[in-house]
Amino acid sequence: MAKILSASCQSGSVTTEGYVISPATILSQGVKASTGIALIEQDQMTYVTSNASDIKDLITNLESIISDVVSALTGIDAVTTAPGSNAALISAITAAKAAITTQKDNLK
Amino acid sequence: MGWTYTLKIQCVSGFFIIRDEATWEIPRFISMVGLQLVSFRDFWTFPFLVTAEDYSLKGKQYLGVTATKTFEGEPWDIMAENGLVYDFGAGLVKPISTITQHLYIKDAGQFYVSNGLLVPGSLRDDGKRVTDYSARFLWDSNSFRYSEVVCG
């Protein structure tokens, strides 16, 4: 039965209880610092990262991008020959951003 | 009380598994041999060994010795992987290479007999070391009958 231990990983190096375990199979990119679990079965070691922080970072970046798009569209809409013609589009994008924010705040 | 050879002592990669068949055997063995035993899982062993974890991490202490290998498994598997044996005389787990005792057993036909319990890691004349054995305690002669001694 495999032993499951809390672990961390950075630059491809897996550490548990303060000791580097090597060679370990890393089931992710393993580049940026992460936390997860190490599974040790006999002399085989596997590291599984927690992707929660990656997902939250991704959503945060999406929020930022969408905010910028909304701001740009709002500015363009104000100076166009038919002001307000993009209001529906801006509202839709704003609603999409709100949905993404809600998702970020309720990550499983 | 029957004086049959029921108490079975197994040394598995330097770890000890002792099984009795009657309740009087363990206390009598402890009294006769002077080695303390405790119940562990479904067998008896030395008190020091019950703290053995089911994994070792290279660089971390395992039963008082710095592990040389990361390994998960039964304590005897981990001890084998890390080259460790239990020296019951010292009450310590040691690297097998540090055991200095020599193997003194006399051939008794199809068995080997010794007055004392063999320390795992004991050296044979050819330089090989005892890693595993199976023995019965002889109640009437206060000695051990070995049916299998593995050296590696």
Image: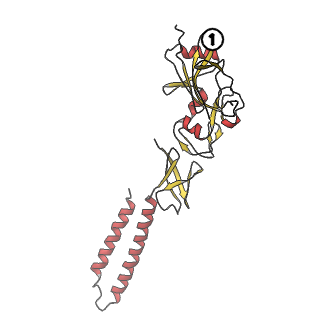
* In the image, farthest residue toward the top: B1
Question: How far across and how far down the image is residue B61, in percent?
Answer: 63, 41
Amino acid identity at mark 1: Ser
| The quadrant where residue A75 appears | bottom left
The image quadrant where one finds the C terminus of chain B is top right
Question: How far across and how far down the image is residue A40, in percent?
Answer: 50, 46
- In the image, is residue A58 above or below residue B72? below
| The quadrant where residue B48 appears | top right
- In the image, is residue A100 above or below residue A21? below
Say left or right for B30 vs A34.
right
- In the image, is residue B45 above or below residue A90? above
| The quadrant where residue B86 appears | top right
**Foreground: B58 or A36?**
B58
Question: How far across and how far down the image is residue B40, in percent?
Answer: 52, 27
* In the image, farthest residue toward the right: B100
Question: How far across and how far down the image is residue A31, in percent?
Answer: 52, 63
Task: Name the residue located 52 percent from the left edge and 8 percent from the top edge.
Answer: B2
**Foreground: B101 or A60?**
B101
Q: Which residue is mark 1?
A: B141
Task: Name the residue located 38 percent from the left edge and 74 percent from the top edge.
Answer: A66
* In the image, farthest residue toward the front: B109
